[in-house]
Image (cartoon, rainbow, N blue to C red):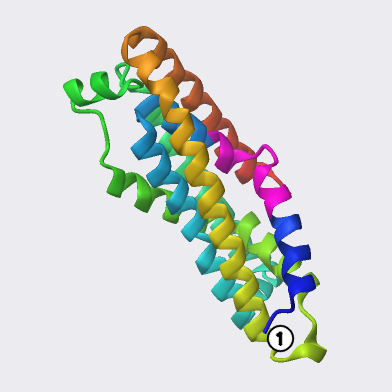
Amino acid sequence: MLTLDQSLAFLAAAILLTLSPGPDNMLVLSLGMARGRLRGVAFGLGCALGCLSHTLLAVVGVSALIAASPLAFGALKVCGGLYLAWLGVGALRSRGGGAVSAARSTGMAESPRRLFLKGVFANAINPKVALFFLSFLPQFVAPARGDANLQTALLGLAFTAQAAVLFGLLGWFSGSVGAWLNRRPRAGMWLDRCAGVVFIALGLRLIVAR
């Protein structure tokens, strides 16, 4: 089991990393603003729970195999980049569905369940997250205190829990901006356009990154 000092040190580092600006934060914020707090929260929780797959990979050591195989890592990297680019194209084609009411009236709004699954999938296929877990979690494992695999699993669960709380709060409070966008459909349209550009840029960056 994890000691109190071990847990506090890990949570402090995990919260700091989760709060730092990054793709997940940006996507949760933009979805919460564009499509309402419920959808922002759903996508944020999906992103957080996607970390469970990387925890499992870290425990069984598959992430190390991916890191050691340029072909496997390259294929996963390209798939993740293409998926982000596909999300960006969808946002660029939006007809101003940034506001919740506008999205519903045009049929462009996705259900919270679908956005939750998208968040899980987008995080689960991200090779950078897999490598991050492989390098981050073991730093807080103390083999002398017990089963290293069990400690790794508990650390991964703790990271997922704090990410779910922080992303959920981000999605919830960003939704208040959505009420303002409901009264300004064109602002929502341009927000979708900006989000689409960001999605595509992140996807291309993931594909070409070394």
Residue 2 horizontal/vertical position (percent): 70, 79
Please state which of residues 57 and 164 is positioned toward the viewer in this rendering.
164
**In this view, 89 is above or below 131:** above
**In this view, 199 is above or below 135:** above
At horizontal 74% and vertical 65% (from top left) the residue drawn is 8
Residue 10, image quadrant? bottom right
Give the magenta part as a residue range. 15-26
Specify whether 24 is left or right of 136: left
Specify whether 137 is left or right of 77: right
Residue 204 horizontal/vertical position (percent): 59, 37
Q: Secondary structure at mark 1?
A: helix
Residue 134, image quadrant? bottom right
At horizontal 51% and vertical 67% (from top left) the residue drawn is 52
Could you tell me what secondary structure mostly forms the magenta stretch? helix
Residue 144 shows in this picture: yes
| Residue density around tag 1, few if under 14, some if 14–19, many if 20 or more, within 10 Å | some
Q: Amino acid at mark 1?
A: Ala
At horizontal 61% and vertical 45% (from top left) the residue drawn is 207
Q: Which residue is mark 1?
A: 148
